[in-house]
Image: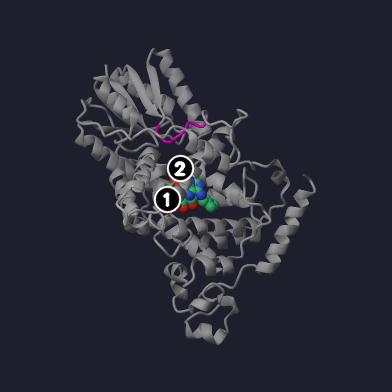
Amino acid sequence: APILVWFRDDLRVSDHPALAAAATSGRPVVVLYVLDDDSPGLRPLGAASRWWLAGSLRALAAALAERGVDLVRRRGPAVRVVEAVVAETGAAEVVWNRRHDPATDAVDRAVAAALARRGVGVRSFLASLLVDPAEARTKGGTPFSVFTPFLRHLLARPAPRAPLPAPGPLRGVGGLASEPLESWGLEPKAPDWAAGFRALWTPGEAGAQARLAAFLDNGLAGYATLRDRPDRPATSRLSPHLRFGEISPFQVWAAASLAREAPRGARPSGADIDKFLAEVAWREFSYHLLAHHPELATRSFQPRFDAFPWRDDPAGLRAWQRGETGYPIVDAGMRELWRTGWMHNRVRMVVASFLVKHLLIDWREGERWFWDTLVDADPANNPASWQWVAGSGADAAPYFRIFNPVLQGEKFDPDGAYVKENIPALADVPASLIHKPFTAPPLLLRQAGVTLGETYPHPLVDHAKARARALDALATIKATE
Ligand code: FAD
């Protein structure tokens, strides 16, 4: 009887414990992907993620075909689909890698229960996180809610296991029905908003490995000092690849750690490597939070924020979404997001802060927009990061720390190169004014081809007034503490 490998957010063949287990089982192998928009409690993927998923499934199908197995694609609630494929194939066992999201874990439990009734066993593996959230505990035996002790705990544990090699040829099972990828409508037709995505990204395992190799060669050295600069290609851009499991954190961790032994001269500093591994650990921490707070995307972690006086401002929300706030660093970020499906981390913090503090719009609105537009939209990282910026999260930035979007721009995009790349209308504005065009003499702006209110918006809010308003709003919930 065959063994069924259920692929989910682990769209790779190397370092894939479930596939490796199938390969060593000696049984014929069935590989399945289920597009599940129907199971209760699941959050359907956003549009940018669907685009990514299509490319990733194509790459996975090719890698599996090279090994002699056809990827079976089915759509529907996972319990029904997995049961059906088990019934069709007579599979004796189902294996998968765990996802560590309470919503998907509930689906997995339902699948396991349904299969148990048929006498079919399941095995699941740790593959998407270095540490199972259930296993990381403070000295007091509780889950972590502060990052630094979590990181210390992670670093004090035995080193993460070495990545597993990809399996060789497998014995497949022929004749199974598989839905054509095109029938799933994952990719845009008209308008084709994904042109900028295709120029930048190669979804799939090979693209992920190429991204990692390029980062180790050109990005890791200097990462600690340059990672906050959106005008530099200083970060790995591995986030969508990690999101869809085209590369595992074990592979990333091992490769970055190995850089400590690179020949001197080519060797990144210890600080560069430590900083990068700490960012990978933030991903672990987000999942740790999600595991213990299943409502991370819908409920403020700190209950006092339930009383926060958010403003209902559809016009403001729309201006933010479209990159028309009149603050160039904010607008550059929002336009980068729309064009490429990704945004630099520093700018994510600035745009999120602007929405939540300058516009006083509920962080959940921003989280939802990111969920739909990011190729790396992640069930843990996205809500955890939004709550961190909003000040409502565990171990969050305090709400009263309000970014000044002009100073943030001047500090992290000093020549305005990032703004100019994303807002061509501002390309000729001198660097000294690029982050505050609204302070420039109109004549000078005209010489640069800019007319405020026509070619580029006036600021939606005045920074000083917005800041004061945000602090007033905060004071109302302070009083309810
Ligand atoms: P690198 O700097 O190269 O870091 C390597 C990897 O570490 C990343 O790929 C990512 O997996 C992880 N990582 C890095 N920074 C963080 C962080 N602050 N928190 C958690 N993990 C991190 N990240 C997502 O993966 N998905 C999201 O949906 C997401 N939403 C965000 C929303 C907001 C408002 C903010 C402020 C941040 C969000 N992040 C999210 C975190 C971070 O911005 C991205 O992970 C990072 O920009 C990805 O770029 P990179 O791969 O070049 O990162």
Identify the residue at image location x=73%, y=54%: 474
Q: Is residue 87 magenta?
A: no
Foreground of the two, 457 or 289:
289
> In the rendering, at what x and y percent does residue 208 appear?
33, 47
In space, the residues marked 1 and 2 are separated at their CA atoms by 37 Å
Query: Mark 1 or mark 2: which is in front?
Result: 1
The vertical placement of 283 against 171, above or below, is below
Residue 465 at least partly seen? yes
Q: For residue 60, which quarter of the picture? A: top left
Per the image, label 2 sits on a secondary structure element best described as loop
Task: Give the left or right position of residue 107, taking residue 296 as reference.
Answer: left
Find disc 1 in the rendering and name its residue.
Answer: 270
> In the rendering, at what x and y percent does residue 109 appear?
48, 23
Quadrant occupied by the C terminus: top right
Circle 1 packing at 10 Å, graded few (<14), some (14-19), many (20+), is some
Quadrant occupied by the N terminus: top left
Task: Give the left or right position of residue 110, taking residue 358 as reference.
Answer: left
Q: Any atom of ligand 1 within 8 Å of the CB at mark 2? A: no
The vertical placement of 162 against 226, above or below, is above
Find disc 2 in the rendering and name its residue.
Answer: 45
Task: Give the mark nearer the N terminus: 1 vs 2.
Answer: 2
The vertical placement of 412 against 394, above or below, is below
- Type of residue at label 2? Leu
Per the image, label 1 sits on a secondary structure element best described as helix
Q: Which mark is residue 42?
A: none
Q: For residue 192, which quarter of the picture? A: bottom left
Foreground of the two, 295 or 418:
418
Foreground of the two, 398 or 262:
262
**Residues rendered magenta in the picture:** 127-133
Q: Predominant secondary structure in magenta?
A: loop
